[in-house]
Amino acid sequence: MAAASESSGFDAWMQSHRLALLLLIISSMAMVAYAMFNDGFYQGEEGAHYINMKEFWEQPSKVLGNWAKTGWKILFVVPGLLGKKAVLALSVLISMATAWVSFLYLRHQGSRFPLLGIVLLMTQTFWFGLSFRPICEPTAAFFLILACYLYRKNQLLWSALALSYALTIRQEMYIPGFFFGLYLLYNRQFLAAFALATFPLLYNLFGWWSTGDPLYLFSNAFKAADFANKYMRPGFDHYLLMSPLVFGFIGILALSAFLGFVLFRKLKPDAIILTPMLIYWLMECLYSMKAYPIGASTAGNLRYLLVISPLVAVAGARALDHLFDAPDRKWVWIIWVPVLALMARFCTYEHNFLEYASFRPHRYYLIVPALLFAISFLFRFRSKMSYFLSLSACCIFSLIISHQPLRLANRDENSTCKEIADWCMKYKYHETRSIYQSMPMFAYFYDRTPAQFPKGLQLITKESVERSPVGSIIIWDSHYAANYGPVDYNYFEERPEKFLPKLQTYSPDSTVAFIIYERINR
């Protein structure tokens, strides 16, 4: 009788909205503290996107385009105007809202452990370490899981609208969106099918109004072909091998269990979760193929997988719910032994948030929490409470030992950009000279848009440099200026009578060269 009462009390506790909110508040506090400690950047684009939010108020069309991710950027233009802390606050709020909807989805589906959805998401390495940053993927993830939840609530119109908004954030969503549209049409849900096109149509109208192109949506989509081979293609298996870094080792174990249970018919497939997750993941793998180039190269950018992070968490939570009292749960080791072996062999190297340093020694300790997690299923848990707390402890332990802080000092080209910005501030060049540069972080360190520089801040192109007035400061770098100008350093070396080198330096990792020139003659 006492055991039944205890079980009943735990069930109410696990389903509690208040407890879920408390868990999210604690998570948000930890995330904000982590954000304050990590003053570095995952990519220089973070600073460029922040400045772009501010540029909306100078020229709304600045947030148009594939790079700007219009649907995401529109949500951030007011926080962008208020400053960096406001952008951080909204980013954390969206991250927490995504975890909240994951909890609601599992609760609605009858899960006994819906809080595991929050735990599995918030302890994913990339979600905890990147979702508070000014990047679009967490917002796309929110609208995707929201669309899935509303579908389960049989609110097809609102589900279609949520997915429709996700289409304006990441183009990869058009493929699962297309299949969802066919599903709606097949089931004669014509209003919902029309709603699926709502935000892309509004986006096209915005583009038409700004550029005069009535087919802006399509014209802009084809511009991606200009960058088809701009970056390397790491190979089809890249996003598979790197997935433990993104979702965490335990996240991959839980997901592999779910896929195995579905494959062997021990669990019903959750099509509304599996379909977009697998399609999106497959698309990123296809974009990375070396032998048969498809679409624009992604350079192996791992943050793209954040879009399906809540789906991975929900699928994993469903598997763990099944495993609690499954009579044959030791069967899961048939899946986990090879998965653990593969992760230990290929996924325990040092990394640069893009690829593994396979020439370095293995760091096998990274797999220890996942191994403890798996071993725990060889035993029977005394209660649901001990089950939940044990699994949560393993997830937190895994996050703690696998996270890799991003500090600005002495790390990469962004830290060198900060040094150059400080150098320009020291001599007040931003007030007295025209500045030409291509680094996305430069304006971020000033917290100004290019239009707010008194003498102007312009991108480096051959045309702009040729027109630069005497006295201009030109900051050339081998990453952005050389590739996007494109302007090679030989352009300046061949014109010594016009451009005087003032400073030359390299990024701490020796991957990017910087040369600062002064225009001395027409």
Image: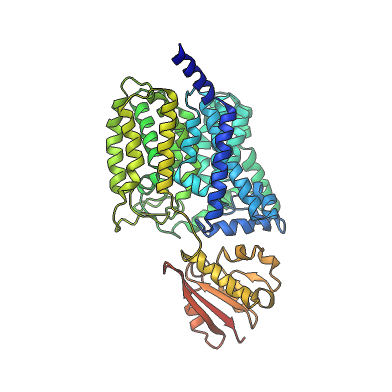
Give the camera-side residue of 416 and 242.
416
Residue shown at the point (32%, 19%) measured from the top left:
327
Where is the N terminus found, in terms of image quarters? Answer: top left
- Please state the horizontal and vertical placement of residue 299, each as a whole percent of the image: 43, 55
In the rendered view, would you say 233 is above or below 338? below
Residue nearer the viewer, 191 or 384: 384
Question: Residue 343's quadrant in the figure?
Answer: top left
How many numbered marks does the figure carry? 0
Q: Nearer the viewer, residue 365 or 354?
A: 365
Residue 246 in the figure: left or right of residue 421: left
In this view of the protein, which residue sits in the foreground, 48 or 287?
Answer: 48
Image location (x, y in percent) of residue 123: 46, 41
Residue 398 position, x and y percent, is 40, 43
Q: Is residue 93 above or below residue 493?
A: above
Residue at the farthest front position: 2
Q: State the colouring used for the structure image.
A: rainbow
Left or right placement of residue 247 versus residue 47 in this view: left
| Residue 181 in view in this figure | no
